[in-house]
């Protein structure tokens, strides 16, 4: 009897268990579909055959296989067998191609964990690059509706390359700059916003195929010229041509080697292009933009049309800059997230903060100067991105106040207050940079907005805002002088630009000397400390001699077409003779042509110095002497 009762109870329990399981089957199935763990014919479309086979064959046992492979990959990584671990990671992502978290984990593992296990900069960069490629070429294409993967890719650009946490971050920045300078050239240097946009528009609207170019007489002849000189219309040709331009602009190359071409140049082809203007224009205006477009699409998986729209929205994005890429991928994440069926699970607020963070860093470091010979990179502030951040902030507030709102995932719906802390921090930095770069009206506007946020959040007595704009800038500058090498470079450039625009352009020699002295004192303070305390400074980040910094800032101001030509003529007239001598060989042609185009007498607007740097015995930069007052 007891046995009979036990059997009945067990049977009843089984029935209840089956019923409960049946009731949960629908929810579990939906969850599996949401996590892309269900394999169907549609889910294997677009996969390589071996991946589709492994995915379908193992079925629900894929989880066990992935667990085993993950444990083995971790053990190999601990033993320093990085390539073997990478092979296993490829199997893991092959078994779970529609599970975004696996791709995110493996990309993070490559870019952060494995890369940190080696001290060789080239190897570290290779692992970081593999992590980005994994997301860009496989993870995101396999999961196009997932916003987390483009967010992860944008974060690697923002934090690993654009940040300072990795001791080799300067090396990463230099490698990225070289990669995209050789791909696109310098599209923003010395250009106004509209000029930079027009330059990139040529890529976005370029021909989709070489056949379209071949159907034109000039294009057909240009392609025949390439073939005649053993060159293909491919990435190697593009990078070779851009290297020629980069080395022509390199101050180090000019000083060390004089005029010439970099190693690996197809010299007969370059000579043929130089001799034939029609074919040169066909190559540079049609074939080169086509190649740039195809490489962006096929290799980097970036849409030139979207890149162009971002430049129209935010300003002259330099695609050699990690934060420009950070913006591209964060914008993609935002667009995908807004179209998701499960927006309540997505932290859209985090995506918006990523966009704003990238814009803030572009304001702090949006201008890149890269010398390919020395592999040296210079990052400088670009106050033009102050307006870009304000635009991004307005867009965010519009989203928050819309009927759809902005999701903060488990924290509910985002509010404008969630962004105020970051906005105030940005405004404080923007105040300082706008002031240093001579736009006191913009500095005052940013200062007033920051002070109003402090009042609205109950901090009306904050001492930062107690003494007015100039005292605020002084307090913030005191902290800038104590920070790292990149902020020092920004400070020096800002001081020299103010010396030129507020000093020489207005015939105020004392103002010029004061700003240059401040910059020189900051430079001496940094390198005196470095010498005695042996502070680690990466070769890519080490600043050149102070006179070279002055020349670089002077060159930028004198080329910048947004500065009126007559203002630049006044700066030239009042500049120290040594500075004019050093910069004339690279500036003279540009200034002369710009003066003639404006209908001015070039010899009067920009008279050559009595003695040029090219005629000196050596190529060392001369130390600029203090400017002298002139009658």
Image (cartoon, helix red, strand yellow):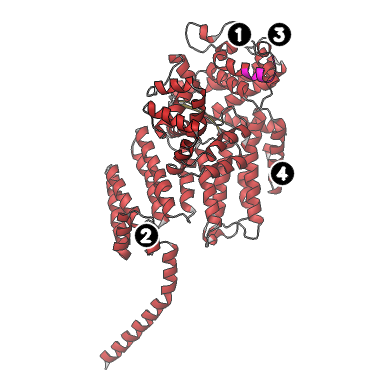
Count residues near mark 2 (Cα–Cα under 10 Å), then give few for <14, some for 14-19, many for 20+.
some
Is disc 1 in contact with disc 3, using a CB cutoff of under 8 Å?
no
Q: How far apart in space, not on screen, are marks 3 and 4 (Cα)?
A: 45 Å
Q: Which mark is residue 452?
A: 4
From the viewer's perspective, is the residue at label 2 or at label 4 nearer? 2
Q: Which residue is mark 3?
A: 630
| Relative image position of residue 306 (x, y in whole percent) | 55, 45
| Magenta-drawn segment | 593-600
Lower position in the chain sequence, tag 1 or tag 3: 1
Say if the magenta span includes residue 595.
yes
Q: Residues within 10 Å of mark 3 (few under 14, many from 20)?
A: few
Mark positioned earlier in the residue sequence (2 or 4) = 2
Q: Position of residue 139 (x, y in %)?
A: 41, 51
Seen from the viewer's position, the closer of residues 514 and 402 is: 402
Q: Which residue is mark 1?
A: 609
Q: Which residue is mark 2?
A: 44
- Of mark 3 and mark 4, the one earlier in the sequence is 4
Q: Residues within 10 Å of mark 1 (few under 14, many from 20)?
A: some
Closer to viewer: mark 3 or mark 4: 3
| Residue 521 image position (x, y, % from top left) | 57, 19
**Quarter of the image holding residue 32?**
bottom left
Closer to the eye: label 1 or 3: 1
Residue 312, which numbered label? none
């Amino acid at each position: 009897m007891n046995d009979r009762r036990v059997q009945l109870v067990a049977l009843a329990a089984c029935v209840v268990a089956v019923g409960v399981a049946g009731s949960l089957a629908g929810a579990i199935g939906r969850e599996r579909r949401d996590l892309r763990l269900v394999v169907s014919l549609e889910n294997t479309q677009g996969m390589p055959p071996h991946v589709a086979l492994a995915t379908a064959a193992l079925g629900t046992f894929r989880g066990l296989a992935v667990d085993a492979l993950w444990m083995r990959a971790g053990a190999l990584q601990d033993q320093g067998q990085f390539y073997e671990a990478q092979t296993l990671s490829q199997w893991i992502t092959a078994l779970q191609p529609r599970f975004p978290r696996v791709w995110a984990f493996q990309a993070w593992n490559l870019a952060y964990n494995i890369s940190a296990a080696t001290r060789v900069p080239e190897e570290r960069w290779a692992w970081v690059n593999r992590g980005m490629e994994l997301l860009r070429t496989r993870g995101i294409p396999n999961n196009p509706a997932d916003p987390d993967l483009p967010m992860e890719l944008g974060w690697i650009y923002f934090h690993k390359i654009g940040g300072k946490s990795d001791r080799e971050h300067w090396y990463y920045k230099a490698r990225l700059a070289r990669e995209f300078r050789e791909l696109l050239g310098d599209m923003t240097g010395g250009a106004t916003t509209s000029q930079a946009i027009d330059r990139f528009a040529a890529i976005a609207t370029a021909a989709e195929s070489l056949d379209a170019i071949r159907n034109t007489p000039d294009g057909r002849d240009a392609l025949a010229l390439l073939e005649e000189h053993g060159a293909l219309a491919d990435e190697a040709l593009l990078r070779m041509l851009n290297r020629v331009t980069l080395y022509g602009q390199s101050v180090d190359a000019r000083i060390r080697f004089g005029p010439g071409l970099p190693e690996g140049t197809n010299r007969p082809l370059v000579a043929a292009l130089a001799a034939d203007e029609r074919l040169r224009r066909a190559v540079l205006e049609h074939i080169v933009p086509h190649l740039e477009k195809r490489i962006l699409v096929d290799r980097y998986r970036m849409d030139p049309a979207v890149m162009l729209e971002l430049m129209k929205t935010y300003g002259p994005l330099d695609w050699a800059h990690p934060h420009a890429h950070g913006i591209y991928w964060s914008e993609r994440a935002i667009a995908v997230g807004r179209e998701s069926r499960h927006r309540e699970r997505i932290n859209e607020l985090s995506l918006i903060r990523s966009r704003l963070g990238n814009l803030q860093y572009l304001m702090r470091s949006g201008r890149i100067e890269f010398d390919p010979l020395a592999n040296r990179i210079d990052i400088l502030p670009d106050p033009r991105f102050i307006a870009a951040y304000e635009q991004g902030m307005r867009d965010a507030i519009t989203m928050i106040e819309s009927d759809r709102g902005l999701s903060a995932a488990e924290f509910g719906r985002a509010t404008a207050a969630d962004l105020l802390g970051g906005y105030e921090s940005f405004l404080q930095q923007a105040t300082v940079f706008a002031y240093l770069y001579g736009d006191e009206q913009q500095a005052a506007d940013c200062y007033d907005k920051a002070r109003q946020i402090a009042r609205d959040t109950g901090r009306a007595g904050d001492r930062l805002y107690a003494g007015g704009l100039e005292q605020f800038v002084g307090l913030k500058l005191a902290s800038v002088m104590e920070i790292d090498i990149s902020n020092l470079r920004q400070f020096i450039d800002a001081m020299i630009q103010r010396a030129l625009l507020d000093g020489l352009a207005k015939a105020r020699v004392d103002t010029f000397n004061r700003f240059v002295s401040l910059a020189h004192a900051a430079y001496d303070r940094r390198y005196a400390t470095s010498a005695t305390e042996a502070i680690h400074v990466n070769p890519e980040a080490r600043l050149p001699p102070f006179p070279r910094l002055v020349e670089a800032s002077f060159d930028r101001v004198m080329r910048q077409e947004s500065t009126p030509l007559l203002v630049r003529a006044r700066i030239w007239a009042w500049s120290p003779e040594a500075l004019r001598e050093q910069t004339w060989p690279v500036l003279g042609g540009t200034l002369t042509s710009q003066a003639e185009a404006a209908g001015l007498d070039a010899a009067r607007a920009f008279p050559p110095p009595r003695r040029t740097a090219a005629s000196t015995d050596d190529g060392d930069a001369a130390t600029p002497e203090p400017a002298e007052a002139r009658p």
